[in-house]
Amino acid sequence: MSKSTDQALNKDLEHKFVTELENNQNIVHKVCSLYTNDRESHNDLFQEITIQLWKAYPKFRGDAKFSTWMYRVALNTAITLYRKSKKRIKTQDYESVIFKIKANEYDDTEERQLKLMYDAVKQLGDIDKALVFLYLEDKNYTEISETLGISEVNARVKMNRVKNKLRTILNP
Amino acid sequence: MMDELELLKKDWQKKEGQLPKLSYDQIYRMIWKKSSSIVKWIFYISIAEFLFWIALSFIPTNTDELQGEGAAFLRGLENVLEVASYLVIIYFIYKFYQNYRKISTTDSARDLMKKIIRVRKTVMLYVWFNLALFAISMIVVLLEVLILDPPQALTEKISAADSNIVAWLLVGLFFMATILFFGLILGLFYRLIYGILLKRLNLNYRELKKLEI
């Protein structure tokens, strides 16, 4: 294959990838908002996930949906590959992008309950967060078990434990 | 609880509109940035470890000056150790590269963690092998010195003690302690790198593994 065709193919791949990611970027933003606590780390993680997605893209066959494939790479990056800096872990502000609470937004009981729930989810461990995230994204247990690499039964067991954990955090 | 989590789910999906929105150009620029993932770090640290031990093997030893009956045997032993260590280096680099290439972000979380841990294990095994080799070489060198070319001060002290077996034992113990000390320091150094880098990953992996028992 000549060099110019190669380049044209690469350009095509780049364009396809960036367009798909632009359309599905919500998934990545949601992962970032769960796993980071401030704007800077959010962008950091988004950057890393983008790099990992791009690196894995040539092997993406298109037999799965782009978004399904994204969940896996994004969560893997957040749980396993991303190196949080110590400084950022210490800052305990829960002001992440999606959870930004405006003072008057959460005044009735239901809203206050929600804020407590979000705070509780943020306190969970990496794996538990992933379970909650996939649950909130309306994924079934088959998908959850495949993404994490555990059996479906164990995914259910784990999910129940997470629910118990959340309950304890909410009612100490 | 179920209801609360359902409530959260509805709110979560409602919040989509509040998410940041990056433009095509912003994302395009991102794909050319350098990754700073843990896998990258492991790769660089492992390469550094390989280079460190390879460089160490190039430090010249002066066994040629030694003479006497045992010298030829000890020199032979040193050569065998050297050839063995080169073979082992080649084996470990090959194994490391193989394991490293298997890492894929499209695996399940558990498989991905397992593969990363395996890469690190290969390098750790290499480090332990080198520490063992280091200890053996130290013993060989010490034997050379003691048997073939003992320092005068030492010989005098030992003969002053009537070549007492205790005196010899003390010398032996002293050298053993030295070897152990260096071994521990180096071992600690590597555990530190290994521990800091992979602490969170190991924790998460154990959590997933525990589920499957």
Image (cartoon, grey):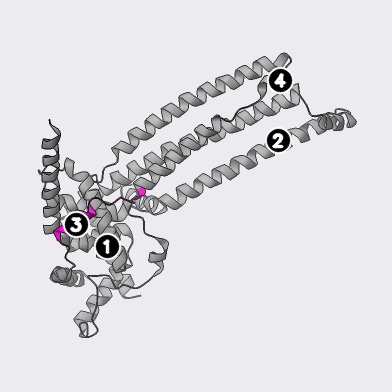
Q: Mark 2 points at which residue?
A: B175
Give above or below for A113 relative to B116.
Answer: below
Q: Is residue A49 above or below residue A104?
A: above
Q: Which label was assigned to residue A43?
A: 1
CB within 8 Å, label 2 to label 3: no
Disc 2 to disc 4, C-alpha distance: 20 Å
Q: What element carries label 3?
A: helix
Callout in the foreground (2, 3): 3
Disc 2/disc 1 C-alpha distance (Å): 54 Å
Q: Residues within 10 Å of mark 4 (few under 14, many from 20)?
A: some
Q: Which amino acid does label 2 sit on?
A: Phe
Residue B31 screen position, x and y as percent = 22, 51
Residue type for callout 3: Ile
- Label 4 vs 3, first from the N-terminus: 3
Q: Look at the numbered disc 2 and give the secondary structure of its residue.
A: helix
Measured Cα–Cα span from mark 1 to mark 3: 11 Å
Q: What stretch is highlighted in magenta?
A: B21-38
| Residue drawn at x 22%, y 70% as measured from the top left | A98
